[in-house]
Amino acid sequence: MQELKYIELETNPDPVASVIWLHGLGASGHDFEPVVPELGLPQDAAVRFLFPHAPVMPVTVNGGMSMPAWYDIKSMDVDRVVDNEQLRASADAVGRMVDREIERGIPAGNIIIAGFSQGGAVAYELGLSYPQRLAGILALSTYFATHNSVTPSEANRNIPINVYHGTFDPVVPEALGRRSIEQLEGLGYRPRYETFPMEHSVCLEEVQDIGQFIREHAL
């Protein structure tokens, strides 16, 4: 996969931490850019946010029409049949962004991978398999698509993971969020799970909790 284009936003000069935040199907990196001021980070916190744009590709559940996507979804049933090879290619592309952040002076242990819906599935794959210890994974309204094929790295065996889901989500049912917790625990991780009375979206309480996660694990 070619290098990803992205939006870059720094809360202050000389950032000491980075958050790479992946959008959902059909969206763009602009989706979560407005969230940054709502995170409640300290005024002097120097964090670099990167919001990559997914490549445009045909999506089977969209009638084969092309749209921004991290991978093809072949079926929207409860088992979410997806193209794992494309998902891993997206994870590799985001992994190269992590590599560049390290080259720019951000320690791997200060880099968080966040993802919403499709982006969350990529965040799981990358965050669990990246060879250096990362600060954490934020999984929003998503599912663990590669739970049967991911190759966990020893460096991230104890990585902090926060999982968020809407109890009224009609796109990615909350059952898939709960299943991802069981799958993570089955692999030896200790994720934290929070639900909110919302659909396939984010809410202010969730965003503020994400801000707290960033403060605790990356700053």
Image: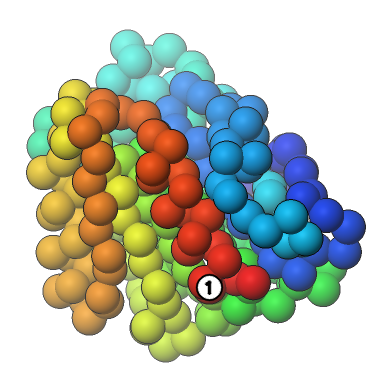
- Identify the residue at image location x=50%, y=36%: 23
- Identify the residue at image location x=35%, y=61%: 162
Residue 156 position in % (x across, y down): 44, 80
Residue 158 position in % (x across, y down): 37, 83
Of the pair 59 and 107, the residue shown nearer to us: 107
Quadrant of the rendering where the N terminus is positioned: top right
Of the pair 74 and 118, the residue shown nearer to us: 118
Residue 56 appearing in the image: yes
- Total numbered badges shown on the rendered structure: 1
Q: Taking 79 as reference, is 102 left or right?
A: right
Residue 100 position in % (x across, y down): 76, 64
Q: Is residue 15 above or below residue 167?
A: below
- Identify the residue at image location x=37%, y=77%: 152
- Identify the residue at image location x=46%, y=44%: 207
Residue occupied by mark 1: 217
Quadrant of the rendering where the C terminus is positioned: bottom right
Q: How is the image coloured?
A: rainbow
Q: Taking 80 as reference, is 43 left or right?
A: right
Assess disc 1: are there few (<14), some (14-19) or many (≥20) residues with their C-alpha within 10 Å of its C-alpha: some
Q: Amino acid at mark 1?
A: His
Q: Is residue 13 above or below residue 9?
A: below
Quarter holding residue 200: top left
Q: Considering the numbered disc 1 on the image, is that residue within a helix, a strand or a loop?
A: helix
Q: Taking 131 as reference, is 19 left or right?
A: right
Residue 71 appearing in the image: no
Residue 180 position in % (x across, y down): 20, 56
Furthest-bottom residue in this view: 154
Quarter holding residue 46: bottom right
